[in-house]
Amino acid sequence: MDKLLYVAMSGAKQSFALQSIINHNVANASTTGFRADLFAAQSRPIPGTGFPTRVNPLATSNGWSSAVGAQQATGRELDVAIRGPGYIAVLGRDGTEAYTRAGDLQTNADGQLVTSGGHPVLGQQGPITLPNSTHVAIGSDGTISVVAQGQGPEAISTVDRIKLVNPSPASLSKGSDGLLRTSDGTTAEADASVQIVPGSIEASNVNLADSMMNMILIARRYETQVKLMSVANDNAAATTRLVSSSS
């Protein structure tokens, strides 16, 4: 009975952990450029004496989804979306170079070009700072051009070029801040073949239909495991009564 209770309890715990991952994905279904977390359930044998007839379920992270989200045209001059594979290089809060596909860019109080999460966008010489200007244009290769305040439209000048990279998704890991970093800690080289679509953003790649279906399936699995715990308790109580009556 103890084994049944232990396995059912472990299964309920892991189902709860999987549900947390799905809930996190659903909560970010409308977050620009969000990469969905993947998950998997594994069976691990329980060590010990006796026959190996018991296994434990174990919820494990299975990386992140590199699927491309839908592009949405906004017409906003600082919005950009990656065309095909590739990433925008940004500076993480820990000071390391990181990568994202969230292209809803803006400027902070210091004039730095940042993501909606406040991460500075990197250019050829580091974080990009935009001068006071009346117009900003971002080319398909990431080149940023501006018309400074007080100047005519013909006085357009190039400020910097967004660092665009294209490392293999298999070489990237996703951090708790939602940014991607190389697994070995190195920085990716700029890739001139990566192109962006100005005036657009990429939506989250979370599949809501699949997420809701998985949420329902795991909830039912959790209910079954809780019922098994109740059955184990009832069986243990019945056994105790039998032993007491025979003594």
Image (cartoon, rainbow, N blue to C red):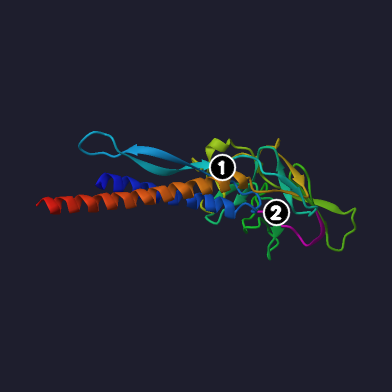
To which quarter of the image does residue 111 belong? bottom right
Residue drawn at (70%, 54%) of the image: 104
The residue located at (38%, 51%) in the rendering is: 226
Say left or right for 239 vs 43.
Answer: left
Left or right of 12: which side holds 50? Answer: left
Which residue occupies the foreground of this view, 116 or 239? 239
| Magenta-highlighted residues | 127-136
Instruction: Give whichever of 216, 231 is nearer the camera.
Output: 231
Q: Amino acid at mark 2?
A: Asp
Which residue is pictured at 23% across the width and 33% down the height? Answer: 51
Q: Secondary structure at mark 1?
A: loop
Q: Where residue 190 sits in the image (x, y, percent)? A: 65, 40
Q: Residue at x 44, y 52 (%)?
A: 16
Give the spatial CA distance, label 2 vs label 1: 23 Å
Task: Give coordinates of residue 64: x percent, y percent.
Answer: 54, 43
- Extreme residue in the top direction: 51
Q: Earlier in the sequence, mark 2 or mark 1?
A: 2
Above or below 193: residue 147: below
Label 1 Cα crowd, 10 Å radius (few <14 / some 14-19 / many 20+): some
Q: Position of residue 118 (x, y in %)?
A: 62, 59
Residue 206 visible to an observer of this rendering? no
Residue 39 within the magenta-colored segment of the rendering: no
Give the amino acid at mark 1.
Thr
Q: 196 or 130: which is nearer to us?
A: 196
The verdict on residue 132 being magenta is yes
Residue that carries the numbered disc 2 in the rendered image: 104
Residue position for label 1: 187
